[in-house]
Image (tube, rainbow, N blue to C red):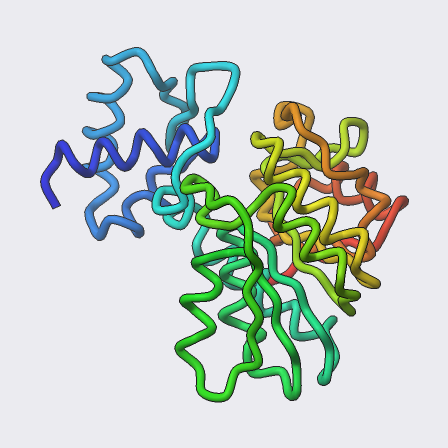
Amino acid sequence: MKQTKRQKLILEMIKVSGEVSSKELAEKFGVSTMTISRDLNELAKGGEIHLIYGGATYKEDSIVEKPMSIKELVNINEKKVIGKYCNNIITPGSSIFIETGTTTLAAAKEIFNIKNCTFYTNSLLVMNSLTNYDEINLHSVPGKYRDLSKGFLGIQASEYIQSFNFDYCLIGAEGISVTSGVTLLDNDDAFTKRAVMKQSKCKILVADSSKFGGNFNFLYKIGDVSDFDYIVTDNKLDKKTYQDIKEITEIVSAN
């Protein structure tokens, strides 16, 4: 990969996650940490990132929504571990709604072989992933297509969802805070997720630890932390946030 392309992807990843480590970037791009350090130094000259010990942070206060192709590059291993843990929650023979998002996509790839389950989704990426498996019982949701979400959202999707009752739903988020709740950057996305949650017996929030904290408080709220039966994250979540949420609902740090 050329240096200019790698630096462009690195900048997008920093914008999405807020902070990255040189080690993580080196592993993702298959280069040395010294090469990544040079890339970060070049990007810092442009004024969009701050260099910190072992990595970099995004300079702007707000984080804009980025394409799924970029989000998929962030915290890959953490998302896979989170997805695997969902096998410990979902029982065979269940109906499961999998919402849009890269962590929910990672979960879909891990839970597809739970016996006799019926899957529903509004995510084009989840649809494409699950159709790779033989004899999968899969239902898609209609609606207005949103490219940034790679999914079908809005009133039509929500009306369709209201005609079902799901045993489980897997929901992702952009920001999670005990005080501000679970939030997103898009209104249609939030509207559809609320509809899914309303029709689901067991609500599972899947999110890597970078999504937690007061700095990630976005405009559109889908619910409070207490609205979820399970919150599954990775083992990098700070202890205080973990304990604060544990007092409200079931939270799991998967590893």
Quarter in which the C terminus is drawn: bottom right
Front one among 181 and 201: 201
Residue 237: image location, x then y, percent: 65, 44
Could one spot residue 152 in this view of the protein? Answer: yes
For the image, the number of numbered tags is 0
Q: Could you tell me which residue is drawn at 68 percent across and 46 percent down?
A: 193
Q: Is residue 253 at least partly visible in the picture?
A: no
Residue 144, given in percent of the width and then of the height, sits at: 51, 44
Q: Residue at x 49, y 24 (%)?
A: 63
Nearest the viewer among 208 and 120 is 120
Give the percent coordinates (x, y) of residue 129: 43, 68
Q: Quadrant of residue 133?
A: bottom left
Left or right: 115 in relation to 44: right
Would you place residue 30 above or below residue 8 in this image?
A: below
The residue drawn where x is 60% and y is 47% is: 236
Which is more toward the observer, 236 or 34? 236
| Looking at the image, residue 206 lies above or below residue 188 | below
Q: Is residue 221 above or below residue 52?
A: below
Residue 100 spot, x, y in % from top left: 54, 51
Seen from this angle, which residue lies furthest right?
A: 247
Q: Quadrant of residue 2?
A: top left
> Residue placed at 64% from the left, 68% from the top?
85
